[in-house]
Amino acid sequence: MSRTATMSQAGLSRGGALDLLRFVAALFIVLYHVAERAPVSLFAIHPAFGRGYLATDFFLMLSGYVLAKTYGPRVLGPKDQGGGVSTAEFLKRRLLRIWPAHLVMLALFVAFVLVTGAIGLAPQNPQWFQWSQLPPQVFLVQAWFVPGASGWNMPTWTLSALIVCYAGFPAAWRATARIASPWTTLAIGVALFLAVDHAAKVVTGIPAHQLPLRFGLVRGIPLFVLGMLIARLPTTIAPRLADGLAILAGVGVLALQVAGRFDHASLALLGLLIYAAGASGAKGWGWAGLAGRLSFSLFLSNQLVAVVWFGLLRAVESKLGVQGPMLWVAWALALPACVAAAWLFERFVDAPLQVWIRGWSRKDTAAKTEPALA
């Protein structure tokens, strides 16, 4: 079997378990971000809510898996079939996918802070909106060991780490292709993760998968590589067995969180969950396809929606004296509010932006390939 055939067994299935997982991962990240704003902090209710960093780690692994399934065959394929993509071209495509929407959301953040400041409303957490931290956010370098607390649109530290992963992906995927056994490459990836995790704990006292956001490269790259290498594993198991494995892995992760702190075992089960969801194949779930499309917008927009939502809630609470169960209802409604805002952002900002960018890219490519006029 050829190298290309070995590395590109089955592409990414849409409208199935993977799309659903992308949305659930984004939703858990939202829940983690709003946990402390509940009438009683969820972190105080059960320690499991304080392990929301696992949702972000899962998102990073899932990103590596999805990217490998989507672009892996194209990176290795013949150039006359759209393959052999250069690192520069690949990075350009990925930046055009994430950066425009990121800049729009950051502009909305800045507008919100300026408008509320102009009318005399101070932010509840001013440390999140330091102007010195805005330039690293604009250029998505805040996870590249930039000093200071990461504020503004805080979740985008993962995009900052992923940019480096994107830059290294074509070379890493081609290097991986030289090793025949996918199990060998996965073992190397696990060893890399454990070595980095242990080194971080020795140096900082914190495992790599929990490091502060400014060390996002150390945290993100090994997890992304793990997801990428899981995508190499053969997916020849029956869809029904894959569904059972996915359910078993998901239940196992939840059970571990109830039982105690078992991060490495939880990450292993999350890796199994990604593999099983990928092997599950297409389900024809239109709603899951929509959820998958919303995951990026939900990830990108939830921080600003939460700031606005809980700012309004604080104002209403002080004026109307809302208390008890109604406070819990108002807090819980933040989740559907974030999903609704993500749908609006995807529908009216992100999707139109990508349509415009694709049109511009085609024109740019055509202009470069046209012969010069004499």
Image (cartoon, rainbow, N blue to C red):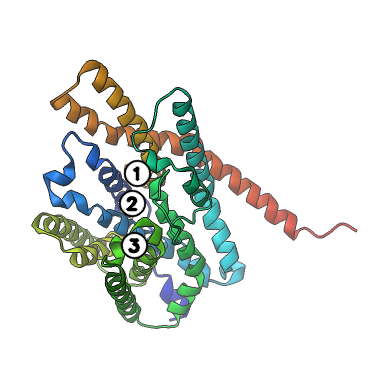
- Residue 361: x percent and y percent? 64, 51
Q: Is residue 283 left or right of residue 46?
A: right
Q: Kindly identify the amino acid type of the residue bearing the numbered disc 2.
A: Arg
Q: In 3D space, how far apart are the residues under numbered discs 1 and 3 (Cα atoms)?
A: 19 Å
Q: Kindly identify the amino acid type of the residue bearing the numbered disc 3.
A: Met
Disc 2 vs disc 1: Cβ atoms closer than 8 Å? yes
- Residue 82: x percent and y percent? 58, 65
Which residue matches tag 3?
61
Q: Is residue 373 left or right of residue 78?
A: right
Q: Quadrant of residue 354?
A: top right
Which residue matches tag 2?
22
Comparing labels 3 and 2, the label whose residue is closer to the camera: 3
With respect to residue 323, does 176 lie above or below?
below
SS at mark 1?
A: helix
Comparing labels 1 and 3, the label whose residue is closer to the camera: 3
| Disc on the earlier residue, 3 or 2 | 2
Disc 1 vs disc 3: Cβ atoms closer than 8 Å? no
Q: In 3D space, how far apart are the residues under numbered discs 2 and 1 (Cα atoms)?
A: 8 Å
- 195 vs 300, nearest the viewer: 195
